[in-house]
Amino acid sequence: MAQPKSPDKMRFEEAFEELATLVGKLESGDLKLEESLAMFERGQALAERCSQLLEEAEITLSQLQGDLASDAE
């Protein structure tokens, strides 16, 4: 079985899609405790990656808005 891709190498869409899949599996309640814990840990890493990428996008947007505002003056 191939190792899953490291969250820090994933694009937002990849990380978010996998996170949504993990949440669905966890919500089903059909997993053993060990599987649930492993999925929870993976989900935490994916959520952190999504948050990081969203923060970076927000900073970029703020900078672009600042550039546009200074160009308009």
Image: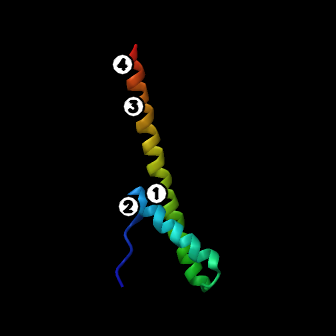
Q: Residue at x 47, y 65 (%)?
A: 17
Q: Which residue position is annotated with label 4?
A: 71
| N-term mark: 2 or 1 | 2
Secondary structure beneath dot 2 equals loop
Question: Dot 4: what SS?
Answer: helix
Q: Nearer the viewer, mark 1 or mark 3?
A: 3
Q: Position of residue 3 (x, y in %)?
A: 36, 77
Residue 44, placed above or below residue 1: above
Residue 60: name its quadrant. top left
Q: Which residue is mark 1?
A: 49
How many C-alpha atoms fall within 10 Å of the one at disc 3: few (<14), some, or many (≥20)? few
Q: Is residue 30 above or below residue 58?
A: below
Picture residue at 37% right of the left edge, 70% below the top: 5
Kind of residue at badge 4: Asp
Image location (x, y in percent) of residue 40 = 57, 71
Asked if the residue under mark 1 is in contact with the one under mark 2, i.e. CB atoms within 8 Å, the reply is yes
The quadrant the C terminus occupies is top left
Task: Say which residue label 2 marks.
Answer: 10
Rendered-image quadrant of the N terminus = bottom left
Q: Residues within 10 Å of mark 2 (few under 14, many from 20)?
A: some
Answer with left or right where residue 8 lies relative to residue 25: left
Give the number of the disc on residue 64.
3
Question: Could you tell me the amino acid type at mark 3?
Answer: Leu
